[in-house]
Image: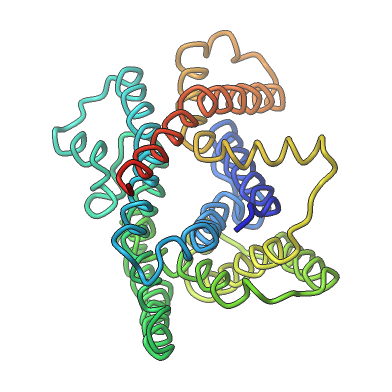
Amino acid sequence: MKRVSSLDYLRGLAAFGIVAFHYKMWLTGLIMTNTFLGKAGIYGVSVFYVLSGLTLFHVYYDKIGTPSRKGITDFTIKRIFRIFPLLWLLSIATMLLHRDDYTTQNIILSFTGLFGLWHWDDTIIYGAWSIGNELVFYIFFPVFIFLSHKPRIWLVLFTMAMLLLYLWFAFLYMYKAIAEGNFWEAYTNPLNNVFLFLGGYLIGLFTVHIAVPRAMTISLAVVASCIFIWLPVSGDATHLIVGWYRVIFTVLCFAICFAFYKTDFGLPIPLHRIFEKLGEISYCLYLVHPLLWYVLSHQFGKYISGLSIPFKVLTGFSLSILIAWAIYQLFEKPFMKAGKRVSEMLAR
């Protein structure tokens, strides 16, 4: 299947919102949930999950087959070469710069990717919990495909089970975790987020061959985005991840991803290249910007302390994008090509 440029645009926008949220938070303190950045900081990651399920369906559904051993091997090798080299590189860089007392368990879990299954909220890299979630989702992905080739009732029953699990977290478990002071561990639990990944997969599965009028998808994107921005929410970040707010914002994430997927528009060449590249480097941008901020604030703090907040944000953004682009070109792309070669070699 051809690459869907509009999904790259949305992925880049989500990464942009998360980076902006973090820089704003680190510079001025916590951001209230009633602001756009407060919502983007939480649900930008949710959009990533939906896009991940949708993109993996788009790329691998036909390749994996019913699924086949060859298809699963190809998927596994390419995902390993896509995720782990950068994860290892930035984990080593973080350990060298922070010089914290990392436990043997923490190091083993972080470098093997097993932190997604155990201690998902305790990672070497700031924000890597979401990568651990992704690694767990990859275990679910062949199951999705397997059920898709069985009588439809099995996929429906599985989806209902995942929905009930999602609602249990939103309406019961998260409230209990907040009351006990460990909401972060509960929120970052991959089982709390797997329904988002499944939702993206199902969007692809059931709409891939359906043509939707562009006016309808654009209207949906505009309406869903407006509700996302202006829906009033009071209190701290925990209010966004529980109860009906959790349901509403999840539906909005699905709607926005669906609209971008079915519109599949192309921007004028200069803008297309910018947003496409931002989408391509989003994985590295997501992981590298906290490390860069640590360096700027701790190693060069005395030089930037007198600068205005907008200038600090602009500097952080510009350097983060530049470094992420360089790492993508010089490090990530060669490993992605190597993964493709290894997969092709094993397929012979």
| Residue 44 at x, y percent in the picture | 57, 52
Residue at the farthest front position:
348
| Residue 54 at x, y percent in the picture | 54, 62
Query: In the visual, does 205 lie left or right of 133?
Result: right
| Residue 261 at x, y percent in the picture | 67, 63
Which residue is pictured at 41% across the width and 49% down the height? 130
Query: In the visual, does 78 lie left or right of 207?
Result: left
Position of 16 relative to 238 (above/below): above
Query: In the visual, does 187 lie left or right of 232?
Result: left
| Frontmost residue, 95 versus 274 | 274
Which residue is pictured at 36% across the width and 21% down the height? 93
Position of 344 relative to 53 (above/below): above
Which quadrant would residue 208 be assigned to in this image? bottom right
Position of 286 relative to 197 (above/below): above
Number of marks: 0
| Frontmost residue, 236 versus 334 | 334
Q: How is the structure coloured here?
A: rainbow
Which quadrant would residue 339 be assigned to in this image? top left
Which residue is pictured at 37% across the width and 87% down the height? 154
| Residue 249 at x, y percent in the picture | 59, 67
Q: Quick one: quadrant of the N terminus?
A: bottom right
Residue at the farthest top position:
303
